[in-house]
Image: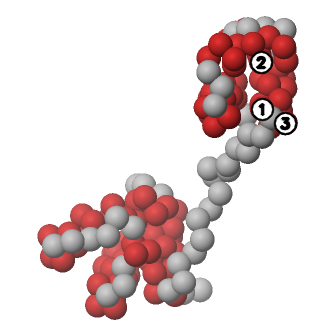
Amino acid sequence: MSIRSLQKLVHVGCRELGLDADTRRDLQLVTTGKSSMSDMSEAELNKLVGELKVRGFRPTDRSAKRPASDRPDIRFCHVMWRLLHEAGVAKVAGAKGLNAFVRSRFEKTWGHVPLDIDHLREPAQIRAVVEALKDWCARAGVELSK
């Protein structure tokens, strides 16, 4: 983890534990002998994060993958989008890019599009997305079955 990321993590931990800036600086001084995070090495920042964890801070893993949709047709949309991205046709990877595609392609037609494709429930709308992605794969030469 980079020094800047560790500094951010310390700030998040202090905020979650309710520590103000003066208390944070005191904790930094007691833990590392330095009152300023900009003077700390990566090892010292890790030590400070460890001290926050001892005091009850539980950092969340923001890189954790979100659960797959329970609908196979929506999971298929995600797979096609990944293949399009790997082929270099879709510029933005993951759910962010797929959701932007669905909004730009269907918002005028449907009038309203959920922020996340995983929230689509109308079978006709899901079929339309699947067919649009299949057509794009065909135009781009992306093979769907192996």
Q: Are marks 2 and 1 in contact (CB under 8 Å)?
A: yes
Task: Give the SS element for disc 1.
Answer: helix
User: 68 left or right of 29?
Assistant: left
Task: Give the SS element for disc 3.
Answer: helix
Amino acid type, mark 3: Val
Q: How far across and how far down the image is residue 63, in percent? A: 63, 52
> What colouring style does the render use?
secondary structure
**Disc 2 or 1, which lies upstream in sequence?**
2
Q: Residue furthest bottom?
A: 123
Q: Which residue is mark 3?
A: 54
Q: How far across and how far down the image is residue 55, in percent? A: 80, 35
Q: 13 above or below 82? A: above
Q: Which residue is mark 1?
A: 52
Q: 63 above or below 85? A: above
Distance, label 1 to label 3, CA atoms, is 5 Å
Closer to us: 146 or 18: 18
- The answer to whether one can see residue 85 in this image is no
Task: Give the SS element for disc 2.
Answer: helix
Q: How far across and how far down the image is residue 88, in percent? A: 45, 59
- The answer to whether one can see residue 10 in this image is yes
Q: Which residue is mark 2?
A: 27
Mark 1 closeness class: few <14, some 14–19, many ≥20 residues within 10 Å = many
Q: Are marks 1 and 3 in contact (CB under 8 Å)?
A: yes
> Which residue corresponds to the image point at 67% horizontal and 49% vertical from the top-left?
60
Mark 2 closeness class: few <14, some 14–19, many ≥20 residues within 10 Å = some
